[in-house]
Amino acid sequence: MVPPTASQRQAAEALLSTIYTEESFNKLIDSTVEGQLKLHPELQRFQAEMFSFIRKYMSWSVLKPEMAAMYAQEFTEPELLELTHFYQSPVGRKAAAKLPVLMQSGMAIGQRHVQEHLPELEKMIKEKQAKVEHEHATH
């Protein structure tokens, strides 16, 4: 892959600044941690440490340069400018505000489906494990 140009990288940073504010990005990260704490209540007693760790390594200021590089690698400069223009529009601002919530809700839907059908996966694993053990015992 061809490395992005400096102007392409600047366009990516402008796009990200249009989509996210530092506050909105950090809220998204915090809600992710809160979701994990709900899924794993045994971690509640480590909540302060988890938030401290996540804020240290997953804050907007830490991730933005690498995210800009990622966007610059995936989109041309004209595409980045067009995306920025879109996210500056009313529907673009609404999309930027709603997408994190929608993604989180989508993940929750997926997790619920997995949880509902986990016994099926456990059965499949046990059957495979029994088959492998049987094959090893007969050889």
Image (cartoon, helix red, strand yellow):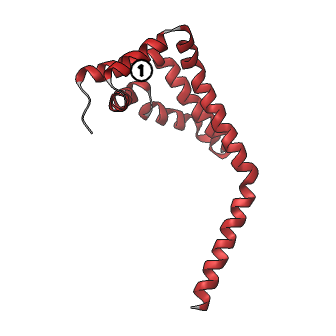
Dividing the picture into quarters, in which one does residue 15 lie? top left
Label 1 neighbour load within 10 Å: few <14, some 14-19, many 20+: many
| 131 relative position to 70: left or right | right
Q: Is residue 103 visible?
A: yes
Residue projecting furthest to the bottom: 139
Q: Quadrant of the C terminus?
A: bottom right
Residue 36 vertical position relative to residue 134 in the rendered view, above or below: above
**49 w.r.t. 62: above or below:** below
Left or right, 74 with reference to 31? left
Across and down, in percent, residue 74 comes to 37, 32
Left or right: 27 in relation to 113 = left
Q: Quadrant of residue 107?
A: top right
| Tag 1: amino acid | Leu
The quarter in which the N terminus is drawn is top left
Residue 17 appears in the figure: no
On screen, 65 above or below 97?
below
Q: Residue at x 55, y 27 (%)?
A: 28
Q: Nearer the viewer, residue 100 or 61?
A: 100
Where residue 48 appears, x then y in whole percent?
A: 56, 34
Q: Secondary structure at mark 1?
A: helix
The residue under the point 38% across, 26% down is 64
The residue at 67%/77% (across/down) is 130
Instruction: Count all numbered tags in the image, as a single digit.
Output: 1
Location of residue 11 in the rendering, given as x and y in whole percent from the top left corner: 33, 18
Residue 8 % position (x, y): 29, 22
Q: Nearer the viewer, residue 25 or 76?
A: 76
Instruction: State the residue in front, 36 or 47.
Output: 36
Residue at numbered disc 1 = 16
Looking at the image, residue 66 sits to the left or right of residue 107; the answer is left
